[in-house]
Amino acid sequence: MKKSKLKMKYKIMTLCFLFVLGVGGAFLIFKNRNFEDKNPTILPNDVESKPIVEEPKKEEYKLTLGMIGDALYHTGTYKDGLKSDGTYNYDHQLDDIRPIVKNYDLAYYNQETVLGGKELGLSSYPCFNSPQEVGDAFVKAGFNLVSLANNHTLDKGTKAILNSVAYWRNQTGVMTAGSYDSESDRNRAHIGEKNGITYAFLAYTYGTNGIPVPKGKDYVVNLFSKEQAQKDIEAVRDQVDVVLVAMHWGVEYTHTPTNEQRDWAQFLSDLGVDVIIGSHPHVIQPIEFIGDTLVIYSLGNFISGQEDLMKKIGLIASVDIHKVVEEGKTTITLDHVKGDLLYTYHRGHKGYRVIPFYKLTNGELGDEVPKVKAKYEAILNKTHHPKIEIGTLGLAS
C-alpha cells in the first residue's frame, strides 16, 4: 500500500514537471516567434538581387598662375646689386615680392636682358647684358616660368645666349622658353605638371631690333610666325591640359594693343591656347578673354632703370586654372582673374626695389596712389570681361 502510494506520488510529480516544462517551452517559442516577426531574417534567395550602381567619379584639380612683366636691367639697376667684395646680389630688390610669389604654383616673368654674365662685360641700353645673379634673385623669390624671347635676346650674340641657356638649365624646377642652344632642345616639348594639371610653355618675339639671327641657328631665339606657332602648338595641344604662350609684341609706351596684337591673339586662341602673356610695350595694356583664352596684352615693366612714372608701374596678375575630370571627359576653366599694381622705387640710382601698391607710403609715391589706381583700372578694363579691380589679389592679407 505504501509502495503504491509512493509510485502515485512520483507519477504526479513527473506530470507536474512535464507540464511546467511544456508551458515554459511554449512561452519561449512564442516569444521567439514574436521577435522574429518583428525582425525577420531575410535570406539572399528571398529578395530579388539588385546591381550596385557606383556614382560617377569626379576628380578636381586647381593650379594658380601668377605673372609679372619685364626684368629690364639698365646700368643703375644692375650696379645696385654690386657688393663691396665685387660680387652681385639682387635679393633686396624683390624683398616685397617674395611673400606674394610664394602663393602661386606657377610664377612667370620675362627676362628682358640676356644673362650672359660678367665674363662678357655687363652693359645697358641699347645692347644689354646682365649678371646671372639677377636670375638667382628671381629663382629664390619663387619664379619658375621664364620667357627668354624678346627684342634684346641677340644683343650680345650667340655666346651670351649659350651662357644664358646653360645658366637656366642648372636652375632646378624652372622652365624657360623662347631661346635655346640647339635645334633638338627647341623642338622638344617643354611640358610640366603641377597639382595634377599638365602644361606646355612656349615663347615668341616679334623681332630682335634688326640684329639678324645667325644662319643655321634659328633656335637661338623664337621669332614669331603663324606657321611656326601653329606647328609648335599642335605638337603639344593634345599632350597637355593647358597651353601657355608668352608673346613679345606691340608698340612701346602705348597702353593700346595694336591690330597686329589682336590678330595674333585671335590666331592663338583659335589654336586652343589657354593663356597669352604679353610684354614689350613696357607699360600696362588691357586684359580680356577671347573665347576661353585669357589675353594679357602687356604686364608692363617689373623692374627697370626707366624714369617716367608710366614705365615704373607694372602689373602682377593671377588666374586660377581648374581641371575637372568626370565620366572620361576633361574640362579646363579659368577664373578669378586678379591684378595689382607694382612700383619700382629708388633714390638716385640706388636702392631699387619693387613695391606692391598696398605697401606704398607717401614718401614713395606721395598722394598719387588713388589717381594712379583709377587710371590703370580704366586701362585694364578697356576691353576686359569680366571687370578687374586693382588691389584684388588680397596682397595685404
Image (tube, rainbow, N blue to C red):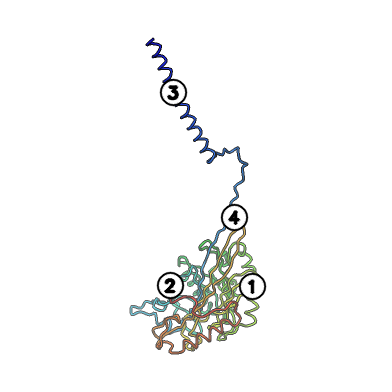
Q: How far apart are marks 1 and 3 (CA)?
A: 96 Å
Q: Distance between the residues labelled 2 and 4?
A: 41 Å
**Whether residue 213 is visible:** no
Q: Distance between the residues labelled 2 and 1?
A: 33 Å
Could you say where residue 2 lies in the image, as x and y percent from the top left?
37, 11
Could you say where residue 369 lies in the image, as x and y percent from the top left?
46, 86
Badge 1 is on which residue?
A: 291
**Whether residue 198 is visible:** yes
| Quadrant of the image occupied by residue 211 | bottom right
Horizontal side of residue 10 vs 315, given as left or right: left
Marks 4 and 1 in Cβ contact (< 8 Å): no
Q: Which residue lies furthest to the top in this view?
A: 1
| Quadrant of the image occupied by residue 213 | bottom right
Could you say where residue 67 lies in the image, as x and y percent from the top left?
51, 74
Badge 2 is on which residue?
A: 141
Amino acid at dot 1? Gly
Q: What element carries label 3?
A: helix
Name the one closer to the observer, 271 or 207.
271
Badge 2 density bin: few <14, some 14–19, many ≥20, Cα 10 Å: many
Badge 4 is on which residue?
A: 56
Q: How far apart are marks 4 and 1 (CA)?
A: 29 Å
Which marked residue is nearer to the observer: mark 1 or mark 3? 3
Tag shown at residue 16: 3
Looking at the image, tell me whether mark 2 or mark 1 is earlier in sequence order: 2
